[in-house]
Amino acid sequence: MATDTGSGSFLANRVDRAALPLAVGDLLVIVAFIYAGTIQHGTVPFPPAGAGDVLTLLSVAAPFLLGWVVAAPLIGAYSAGAAESAKASVPLAIRSWIPAAVIGLLVRATPVVEGGVAITFAAVMLIVGSVSLGVWRYVAGQFL
């Protein structure tokens, strides 16, 4: 019995090109709901007044984008079939967001990143992120 020992890496088996529109949308949704939070707390104005505001937004979003880039492929957010229907896509996004948000929160808890982690912030990130990605994936499932 032969075993396939190198026809594809783990990551290549977890990421399907058909899911590229989902990946782009996911990243935009994550930045958008984090931007909404920065507007709510007065960290970044709407619209951003300049490059400094954009950099501030990206510095707030970076830990969560890092978490997403690590968790989403491992969980299978872009695996074969993820882009076929909302029924497949939404749960994969939510299951990917939970560890992605935890990674982001852990990064923010370090002294290297400004902001810290309050329990209410953690709850908002987990809930709003899950809902935002779930709604996006549901809508995408209707049109993609």
Image (cartoon, grey):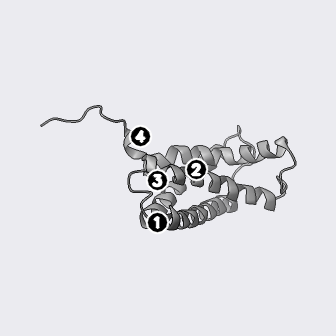
Q: Is residue 122 above or below residue 59?
A: below
**Sequence order check, earlier mark of 2 and 1:** 2
Q: Can residue 31 be seen in this view?
A: yes
In this view, 41 is above or below 8: below
Q: Name the residue under label 1.
A: 86
Circle 4 is placed at which residue position? 11
Q: How far apart are marks 1 and 4 (CA)?
A: 22 Å
Query: First in sequence: mark 4 or mark 3?
Result: 4
Foreground: 57 or 108? 57
- What label sits on residue 77 in the rendered view? 3
Q: Check disc 2 and give the amino acid type.
A: Val
x and y percent of residue 58 in the render? 72, 45
Residue appearing at x 34%, y 36% in the figure:
8
Q: What's the residue type where badge 4 is placed?
A: Leu
Residue holding disc 2 = 24
Residue 42's quadrant in the figure?
bottom right
Kindly indicate whether the residue at mark 4 contacts the one at mark 1 (C-beta within 8 angstroms): no
Label 2 sits on a secondary structure element that is helix
Left or right? Give the position of 48 relative to 133.
right
Nearer to us in this view, 23 or 117: 23
1 vs 4, front mark: 1
- Amino acid type at mark 3: Ala
Q: Is mark 1 on a helix, strand or loop?
A: helix
Nearer to us: label 3 or label 2 = 2
Distance between mark 3 and mark 2 Cα atoms: 12 Å
Which mark sits nearer the N-terminus, 3 or 2? 2
